[in-house]
Image (cartoon, helix red, strand yellow):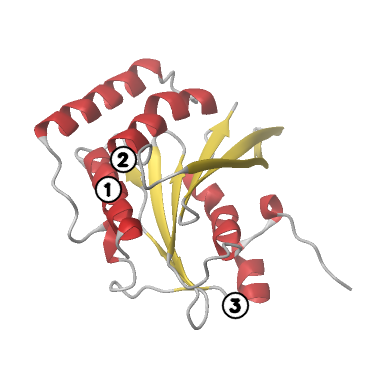
Amino acid sequence: MIQTIQAKDISLEELQEHFGLQLTTNPKFFPEWQENLPVLTDEEKRALDRVKSNYFNLFNGRYLLEEVVKMVVLSPLLDFAGFYQPPFAIKTESSIEITAEDEGVIVRGNIDVLVIQQQLWVLVIESKSTKFDVMEALPQALAYMLDNPRSNKATFGFLVNGREFVFVKLTRENKPLYSRSYALSMERENELEQVLSVLKRIGQFMSHP
C-alpha cells in the first residue's frame, strides 16, 4: 500500500526512515555559512541597521505577522543579496500549515515557500499567537529540498521567522546528507550581517558552483 505523507506533516524521523536522510556534523560539508564570506560594505551595514531598526520598532513582544516579516526583514535581505536580479528567478510555492498548543489553545501558523533557481528554498514562518521556533520549518524544508529535480547539485534552505535565521545544505550524490547552521539572531550583534554575507556566498555558489 502506497503511503502518502504531506510535507506539512513530515518529521525528521520519517525523512530518515523513508529517504535515508542523515545529518552530518562534518564541518567541511557546509563551509558556505562560515568560511570565505563576502565582506559587507559600509553602505550594506547601514542598510542592515535600518532593517533592524524597523524590526524592533514593529515587534510588539509576541509575534510579527508573516507579511510584515516578508516585507520588513526578508525582502530587503534578498534584495541586498542580489536575488532579484539575473541570473536568479523566484517562484512561490503553496503555503503549508503548522500547529502548536499555547496554554491549552490550538494555534495555527503558515510556512510560505519561495524557491530561487531550484537551489535555494526560503521558508517563512507566520505565527498568529505564539512564537514558533524557526526549526519548525526544518522537516518541511528538507522534504522540499529532497524533491528537487536537480539531484546532482547541492541545495540550500533558508528558514526565517523574523527574529531568527537558519541555513541548511543538502546533497544527494551517494546518499542524502544535510547539515545546518545554528540559529542566527536579529538580536545578537553582527549576526544579521552574517546572514546577509551567507546569502551572498550562497548566491556566488549558485552562480559558479
| Residue 22 appears in the rendering | yes
Q: Is residue 178 above or below residue 73?
A: below
Where is residue 45 shown, x and y percent of the image? 16, 32
Q: Nearer the viewer, mark 1 or mark 2?
A: 2
Spatial separation of the CA atoms under disc 1 and disc 3:
30 Å
Query: In this view of the protein, which residue sits in the foreground, 162 or 151?
Result: 151
**Quarter of the figure that contains the N terminus:** bottom right
Residue at 75% in and 60% down = 5
Q: Which residue is mark 3?
A: 20
Label 2 crowd (10 A; few <14 / some 14-19 / many >=20): some
Question: Disc 1 on helix, strand or loop?
Answer: helix
Q: Earlier in the sequence, mark 1 or mark 3?
A: 3
Q: Earlier in the sequence, mark 2 or mark 3?
A: 3
Label 3 crowd (10 A; few <14 / some 14-19 / many >=20): few
- State which quadrant residue 186 falls in: top left
Relative placement, left or right, of 77 versus 16 is left
Contact? badges 1 and 3 (CB < 8 Å):
no
Where is residue 64 shown, x and y percent of the image? 48, 25
